[in-house]
Amino acid sequence: MAEDRVQKILSRAGFGSRRSCEKFIEEGRVTVNGKKITLGAKADPAVDDIRLDSMPLRKAEKKVYIALNKPRNMLSLNVPDDPRPTIFDLVKDERHLYPVGRLDFESEGLVLLTNDGELANRLTHPRYEHDKEYEVRVSRRPDEEQLKIWRRGVVLEDGYRTLPATVEVKSYTKKGAWLTVVLREGKNRQIRRTGVRIGLPVQAIRRVRIGPIELGKLQPGHFRYLRPDEIQALKDYTTYTK
């Protein structure tokens, strides 16, 4: 095999999306033949010893696809020196899994885990605009104008304008409501920030779908391996969407 950029080699081997592998290199976590490399370095996986955090690159590793119901108050990533629990405390798989559809600490619901770097990249890269569906509890009953603003896009505090979204009232609570929200992007804490901007403080967020994969009856803190038909549906979805 000819030389290639190391971030592409890592991604193909299942260590995450290409961008996440670039970050690994920038953080000094990747070595080739025992030496730390910089972004842009090339290697030949058939000849060179490529490692991430001292973990050797595995050739032809079997691909794995997992659906997890992330509980509240849990991180979606391993963060050095952060003592809070992470989803990897729940899924103890020896393969290097990459979370697709990260959720903030307070939110719960569906997260996918895979070592299929190419699929992870297609599911997470903003340009593909894949659907993600959420159940969102707000502390006030929304009026039609607030819903219209959310649907057409909201200018956040940093000046970014969100993409149009699908927003419907699912049910009313004593003082607020449960909303069904479908987004085609995933900016940091986007739903909570949107709620603040339009006067609908968000109390709870539960993601129930990523593309064709639904949370279903999976309980918080539990996970399952995707069925072959679900894996194929996910691959078809990423192939035929943007």
Image: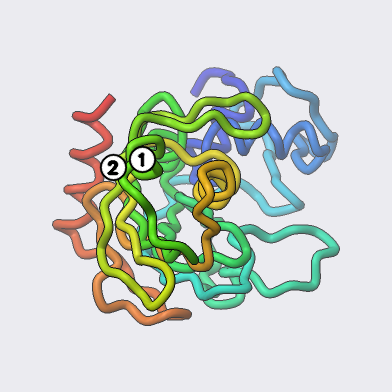
- Of residue 34 and residue 132, the one placed in the foreground of this image is 132
Q: Secondary structure at mark 1?
A: helix
Residue 149, image x, y percentages: 40, 35
Q: Which residue is mark 1?
A: 145
Instruction: Locate residue 128: give its quadrant.
Output: top left
Q: Does 169 appear above or below 234?
A: below
Q: Which mark is residue 196?
A: none
Residue 10, image x, y percentages: 57, 37
Q: Mark 1 near mark 2, Cβ–Cβ under 8 Å?
A: no
Q: Is residue 141 left or right of residue 10?
A: left
Residue drawn at point x = 37 percent, y = 42 percent: 183
Residue type (three-letter) at the residue carrying disc 2: Thr
- Of residue 106 and residue 242, the one placed in the foreground of this image is 106
Instruction: Locate residue 217: give its quadrant.
Output: bottom left
> Mark 1 or mark 2, which is nearer to you?
1
How would you rate the neighbour count of disc 1 (Cα within 10 Å): few for under 14, some for 14-19, many for 20 or more?
A: few
- Residue 203 visible (yes or no): yes
Residue type (three-letter) at the residue carrying disc 1: Glu
Q: Secondary structure at mark 2?
A: strand
Residue drawn at point x = 61 percent, y = 30 percent: 7
Residue drawn at point x = 36 percent, y = 40 percent: 145
Residue drawn at point x = 57 percent, y = 42 percent: 197
Residue 232, image x, y percentages: 18, 48
Q: Which residue is mark 2?
A: 166
Q: Does 164 appear above or below 108?
A: above
How would you rate the neighbour count of disc 2 (Cα within 10 Å): few for under 14, some for 14-19, many for 20 or more?
A: some
Q: Is residue 155 left or right of residue 51?
A: left
- Residue 119 visible (yes or no): no
- Of residue 22 and residue 83, the one placed in the foreground of this image is 83
Considering the image in quadrants, where does the C terminus appear? top left
Q: Is residue 210 left or right of residue 4?
A: left
Q: Is residue 144 left or right of residue 37?
A: left
